[in-house]
Image (tube, helix red, strand yellow):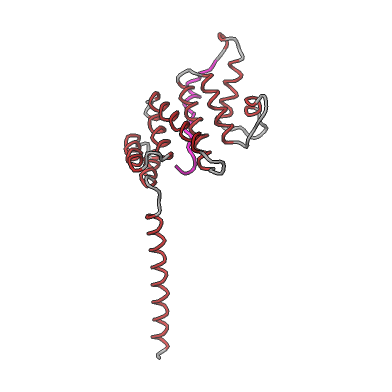
Amino acid sequence: MNINILRRFIIICAVSTFVMFTFWAVYKSFVNRPLGDYETEVCDNRLKDKMWDKAIKAANEALIKNPEHRGAMMCKAIANINKKEYDLALKQLSNLIIFLNKNLVDDDLTGRGTLAAAYANRGIIKDRKGDYEGALKDYIKSLETDSEAVEGPGLGEKILYMINKPSSIRKRAQYIHEQLKLPEEERVLSVPDRDKEQIMHKPGKL
C-alpha cells in the first residue's frame, strides 16, 4: 500500500474520532443538563447586563421547567431587588431560605453558598427598609452558613468578631451591632452614600 495513502487514512480516522468524541461530549452535556439550567444561565447573563426584566423572564421560564430550581429562584429575587421591588424579593428570598433549609444536605457546597447568599440578600433588603435588627440577624445567619460550624454561647459575637479578613457583610453587621448598642438618638444606621455600595450576593454558579 502506498505510504501516503496510508498516512492520509490514519489522519482522517484520527480527525473523525476526535470530531465524534467532541460531538458526543457536547451532546451529553445538553441532554444530561438539569431542567431549567440553561434558562437560569440566561438569567445570570441578563443580571450582568443589568437587564432586570429579561432576567426575570428567563428565571420564570426556568421555574416553569423546574419549579424547585434554586438558582432561578435566586436570580429572580436579585433582579427584583435591583428593580427595588423589595417586598416581592423579600418574599422570594424567604421562600428560598425555607426550601433550602428543608432540602439542603451536608455535602452540598453550592447549596450552602446559595443559602448564605439568600440570607445576605434578605439582610440587605431589611437594611434598606430600616429593619436593622432583622438585617443583623440575617447577616449573622449568612456568615454562619458560609463559615465552618460554630457552636456554643455567644454565637453572634464569635461570628461578628472572627479574626479572618472581614467581608462587606461582616463589616456592615459589625457596624449595625455597634450602633444598636448606642442610645437611639445617637445611632447613625443609614448612610445613603455608603448604603449604595452594598452589592447583591449569589453563589459562583446559579
- Who's the residue at 35% across and 42% down the image? 62
- Who's the residue at 40% across and 51% down the image? 33
Residue 153 position by quadrant? top right
Percent coordinates x, y for residue 78 in the rendering: 41, 33
The segment highlighted magenta reads 188-206
Percent coordinates x, y for residue 99 in the rendering: 46, 34
Quadrant occupied by the C terminus: top left
- Who's the residue at 39% across and 68% down the image? 20
Residue 160 left/right relative to 138: right
Q: Main SS of the magenta segment? A: loop
Percent coordinates x, y for residue 185 in the rendering: 56, 8
- Residue 110 lies in the magenta-colored region: no
- Who's the residue at 60% across and 36% down the image? 147
- Residue 191 lies in the magenta-colored region: yes
Percent coordinates x, y for residue 81 in the rendering: 41, 29
Residue 37 left/right relative to 170: left
